[in-house]
Amino acid sequence: MAAMRQVVAVIKPFKLEACLRALASAGVENVTHSEARGYGRQKDHLRDYRNDRFAVAFLPRMRVEFAVAPDDLKRAVDAVLQACRTGRQGDGKIWVLDARTPG
């Protein structure tokens, strides 16, 4: 059996339901998601906070994770891209990692 791939996607919160529907349609099972906060190129979100001019206002995001077989990887990643892309800055990121199983 080929090594599985772990996909981690950080997306905008309002795109979560569309992402989960797209993954289900692509045949992806066993998806987990959690709340996350972060920032990227959104430099306009810098805020003054307790006299720290460089403090950053972290933006709300959702972290979606799942594992797929290599043959299903492109279909799953394309499903996330199509469901979550708005065309605006800050749509998110997708990482593909080698998944390891204990044993």
Image (cartoon, rainbow, N blue to C red):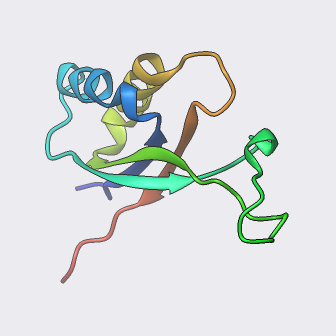
To which quarter of the image does residue 49 belong? bottom right
Along the viewing direction, whichever of 3 and 96 lies nearer the viewer = 96
Quarter in which the C terminus is drawn = bottom left
Please state the horizontal and vertical placement of residue 58, each as a whole percent of the image. Answer: 59, 54
Which residue does the image show at 43% across and 30% down from the upper left? 74
Please state the horizontal and vertical placement of residue 65, each as a whole percent of the image. Answer: 32, 50
To which quarter of the image does residue 54 belong? bottom right
Identity of the residue furthest to the front in this view: 50
7 relative to 50 in the view: left or right: left
Above or below: residue 62 compared with residue 6:
above
Which residue does the image show at 26% across and 26% down from the upper left? 17
Which residue does the image show at 32% across and 31% down from the upper left? 16
100 relative to 94 in the view: left or right: left
Which residue does the image show at 38% across and 26% down from the upper left? 15
To which quarter of the image does residue 56 belong? bottom right
Please state the horizontal and vertical placement of residue 50, each as a whole percent of the image. Answer: 72, 71
Please state the horizontal and vertical placement of residue 30, each as a whole percent of the image. Answer: 14, 46
Whether residue 9 is visible here, answered yes or no, is no
Identity of the residue furthest to the bottom in this view: 103
Quarter in which the N terminus is drawn = bottom left
